[in-house]
Amino acid sequence: MISPISIHEFFSKYFEKNPLRIKRDDRSYYADWLCTKDIDHMLKEERVMFTEHIDLATYENGHRYTRNPPGRAFRSVVWDHYNMGCSVRLLCPQLFFNSIRYRLGLLQEYFGCFVGANVYLTPPASQGFAPHYDDIEGFVMQLEGTKLWRVYAPRNSYETLPRTSSPNLSELELGEPILTVNLEPGDMLYIPRGFIHQACTPSDRHSLHITVSTYQKHTWGDLLSSLLPVALQSAIESNVSFREGLPVGFLRHLGCFAANMNSVASEDASPAEDCRKRVRKGVVRRLRMLANFIESGSYENKEKAKQLSISSDKPKPSAEKPMDPLYAAADLMAVDLISQSLPPQLDAGEACCHVEQQGERWHATPSDQKDENNSDDPPRVVHVVELEPDTEIRLVRWSAVRVIRHQLSPVGKRGRGVVDHSHESNDDDDKQEAESSTGITLYHSLNNTLTYKERELDDLAVLPDYVPALDYLCNTFPKFVAVEDLPLDSLEAKMEAANGLYEAGLLITSCPLEAESVYDDSLLEASNDSAEDWTDSDVLFEDSNDEPRYFGDSSTNKEDTDEEIRVIPVVRTSGLSDRTEKQVKEKKSDQCALVPVVGANSTEKKRRKKKSQKHKKSAEH
């Protein structure tokens, strides 16, 4: 996008600092992004709505007007307005064009923040929008025609790197442009936040360009907005200085009204001034303490951390480390980013190595539809695949997942939860403590739609046992690693972790899995066996009726369900950080924290267990 400028040169000289124009002699440089013919086809074949997907705009006599009719944007209506001088703006081109969607996904992975795009089609001798500045870093790529751009420096320090876009500006509010360029197909213009710009077409040519935008509200100020409330709450809980009372009657001497009164009554100025100095000094001292707390990365004392680590006989990695408020703030921003993001966009090579395209499917010939008793080629499940210990795997995308650590509240007060009860005693107090223990939650964008924040973010709540393997997968991304190299204690645990992640859609394999022709009939021998092989009987989950139940408990009738419940292991990015219950977004009760695999039963469980044992024996030999 910025070639031949190097990444180092771009970020050191231009990013957030100066506009950049890249002139290319290759008119087809961006040809595979989009063309006007593609827009015409979209209007014909897709359900495009005015205001939601497309805008019609004009700029006349110093004023900008939106000309959107109500309802659907029919092709003839759009082109009629275009002929009358309206500019056409596509608000979410990634909805309709795979080429744009895939590239935005890659840029999102690189920048680590939301990346969007708008497409602008302007008729000859037209200007669709008034002069303005934006709250994003904009990359303007000229696709067709030509357009004259004028760029102006920020007018003052308040408009430098703004967090909100400007209203429409008039020509009288502008100074002299610092850059005037005519973009041709293949050219690129970078416009930093706060730089005012306007553009128009010549009298004989139209213009088509796409603006890729990023870094909206992705600033130090936004990080601090998340960090300071978390840090302050931790400081209040852990340091008595933040809980000391304020000076008695200090409000009499602080505030604008109090300051005016004290200036009139000079005889009371000395006590008032002493009070103001005392309060100001106390605030500054505590702010410095807060900064020191953030720098140290921990508020909780060693005794509390020790109590967390020995609350169970079994070590819990997620509970051994006290909360770092900086990590918690980063988690808040990351979860918000994932909620905005496009789902992972896989290329053809990746897609054929993902659970969405490879694996079991139904086979039936046309003759089978007429005669299901055809013994020569009966309808059946084919293309059975399995992960092997030497299968190489990696995450679909690093930016598509985020794992956080938080406090699980008692079940009755929370919409969902997964708790390890393997060491739970029968004592009610111990049970309450276990139910309020630390949990791990994975947020992911795999099920996001192509429309900005159209649905709630999906999450999975899991036990901490798989964290070392998942951390390993994250740290080795984008390299592929063998399942048997995951840092877990047993091969069975490694296979279970890999299968859980793969079936959740979070992994791809390095190459397509080799398929069997049909299921092995010998596996059916276990179909009537008891359910004693369930390994996740200590997992608590809540169903859509908000009734907690234990899988494997006597209150659950296994004959009434054919679902296999598997704990889905999760991936963390820049380290696990704590979050309190208030900082974890509550989910609806019908969003189960586990993933039920419908149709799977103990037969499949036995098959995988036998296969794991076979691999284990082979490894021993």
Image (cartoon, rainbow, N blue to C red):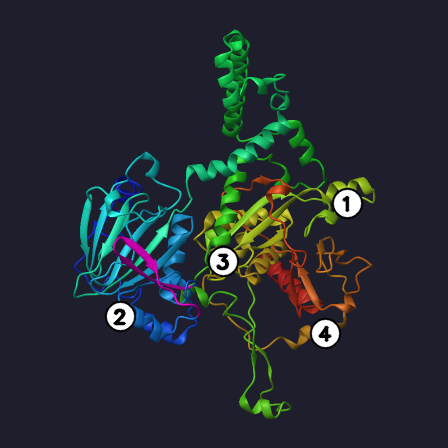
Which is nearer the N-term, disc 1 or disc 2? 2
The amino acid marked with disc number 2 is Asn
From what the image shows, is residue 424 above or below residue 532? above
The secondary structure type at the circle numbered 4 is: helix
Reading the image, the residue beneath label 1 is 424
- Work out whether residue 349 or residue 346 is closer to the camera in this orientation and state it: 346
The secondary structure type at the circle numbered 2 is: helix
Crowd band around label 4 with a 10 angstrom C-alpha radius: few (<14), some (14–19), many (20+): few
Q: Nearer the viewer, mark 2 or mark 3?
A: 2
The amino acid marked with disc number 4 is Glu
**Residue at image location 32% in from the left, 43% down from the top:** 194
Q: Are marks 1 and 3 in contact (CB under 8 Å)?
A: no
Which is nearer the N-term, disc 4 or disc 3? 3
Reading the image, the residue beneath label 2 is 83
- Work out whether residue 373 or residue 67 is closer to the camera in this orientation and state it: 67
Q: Residue 110, percent across and down? A: 38, 50
Q: Nearer the viewer, mark 2 or mark 4?
A: 2
- Residue 87 horizontal side relative to residue 492, left or right: left
Reading the image, the residue beneath label 4 is 525
Q: Nearer the viewer, mark 1 or mark 3?
A: 1
Occupied quadrant, residue 48: bottom left
What number is the disc on residue 393?
A: 3
Q: Which residues are magenta?
A: 53-71
- Work out whether residue 97 or residue 569 is closer to the camera in this orientation and state it: 97
Q: Residue 521, percent across and down? A: 66, 77
Cα separation, mark 2 vs mark 4, equals 72 Å
The amino acid marked with disc number 3 is Ile
Which is nearer the N-term, disc 2 or disc 4? 2
**Residue at image location 52% in from the left, 43% down from the top:** 331
